[in-house]
Image (cartoon, helix red, strand yellow):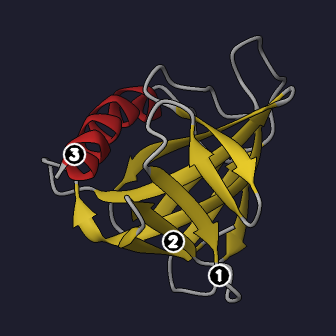
Amino acid sequence: MRTYISRLAIIALAALSFASCSQSAKTDKAATDTTVKTEVKPAVVDSGKLVGAWHDEAIKSDKGEEIAYEVVSSGHKVYIQAITFTGKNLILNDTPPISPSASEIKKDGDKYVSVERPDETYKIDKEGNLLIYDKGTLVATCKKLL
């Protein structure tokens, strides 16, 4: 339940930060029929490099928007943050801003562990999907987009 509430809080804050992103310059086709768009723009102090993105088809925001997760690196730190989108068009930024709701994650063997919530872990499976665990229990499987 705590993870679900944490995910909702991340989603709400990510929706605010996602709304400030500008439109895309190039388009990639993902394995699903979702269109993924990326934008290249100069990095700023509180932005990072997009490592990957995954769609969480199981939940939606309070406004009915689709949810995706971005993994972003900045220096020696790695963050995961939720973003929202509508329809089948997801706009991604090559140097996304790191939102205040982003969670820092650290590598621990074959998984990543949340610095703020050590019971929350993330793994990438053989197909490239993001697996989210809470206290060792799988709570979400998110399809790889990028």
Look at discs 2 and 3 and give the one toward the viewer: 3
Question: Mark 1 is on which residue type?
Answer: Asp
Q: Is the residue under label 2 in contact with that under label 1 (CB below 8 Å)?
A: yes
Residue at point 69% right, 67% down?
146
Residue 86's image quarter?
Answer: bottom left
- The residue identified by callout 1 is 125
- The residue identified by callout 3 is 2
Is residue 45 shown to the viewer in this render? yes
Q: Is residue 38 left or right of residue 123?
A: right
**Earlier along the polypeptide chain: callout 1 or callout 3?**
3
The residues bearing labels 1 and 2 have C-alpha atoms spaced at a distance of: 7 Å
Residue at point 47% right, 19% down?
100
Residue at point 51% right, 31% down?
102
Question: Mark 3 is on which residue type?
Answer: Arg
- The residue identified by callout 2 is 131
The residues bearing labels 1 and 3 have C-alpha atoms spaced at a distance of: 24 Å
Q: Nearer the viewer, residue 69 or 31?
A: 69
The residues bearing labels 2 and 3 have C-alpha atoms spaced at a distance of: 17 Å
